[in-house]
Image (cartoon, rainbow, N blue to C red):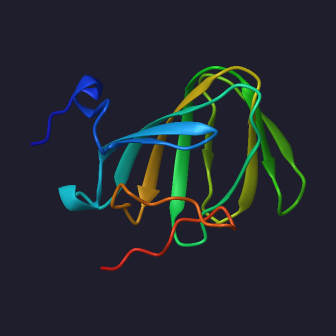
Amino acid sequence: MIVRQLAEILYTDKDVHAQTWTSRRLLLKGDNVGFSLHDTVMKAGTDTVMWYKHHIEAVYCIEGEGQLECLENGQVYDLHPGTLYVLNGHERHRVKPRTDIRMVCVFNPPVTGQEVHDKEGAYPATEG
């Protein structure tokens, strides 16, 4: 059994910061559970393009408001608490938070915890 508190993650190497977001990595590949779980905050007024070409990501919004745009078809969706989206087709997408927005994110395959988005907005493929 794994039991963790968010407070244990803060200010460690599992508390990863980028220009437009902060991701607290609660479960990672090394935990051997088949997925990774992140508590992510995206900053108000930012515009982030991402493309998880090697991962499927499920995102559940628990705080804040913003907008999700699928760059494959131009469809735009409102994000607010209770909204779920899944990038099961590896869609390029854009997130534009109107307020700070907090989301629970699940990645399959799991990430190691130190990935950064490349110039395409993607994480590298994970081995094994």
Taking 1 as reference, is 35 left or right? right
Residue 1, percent from left and from top = 9, 42
Place residue 63 in its image quadrant: top right
Q: Classify 4 as above or below 1.
A: above
Front position in the image: 71 or 121: 121
Residue lying at the far right in this picture: please name it.
74
How many callouts does the rendering have? 0
Q: Residue at x 71, y 63 (%)?
A: 91
Residue lying at the far left in this picture: please name it.
1
Residue 49, percent from left and from top = 73, 53
Residue 51, percent from left and from top = 66, 62
Q: Residue at x 57, y 60 (%)?
A: 117
Q: Residue at x 23, y 57 (%)?
A: 33
Taking 28 as reference, is 95 left or right? right
Q: Residue at x 62, y 41 (%)?
A: 19
Taking 126 as reference, is 17 left or right? right
Taking 27 as reference, is 92 left or right? right
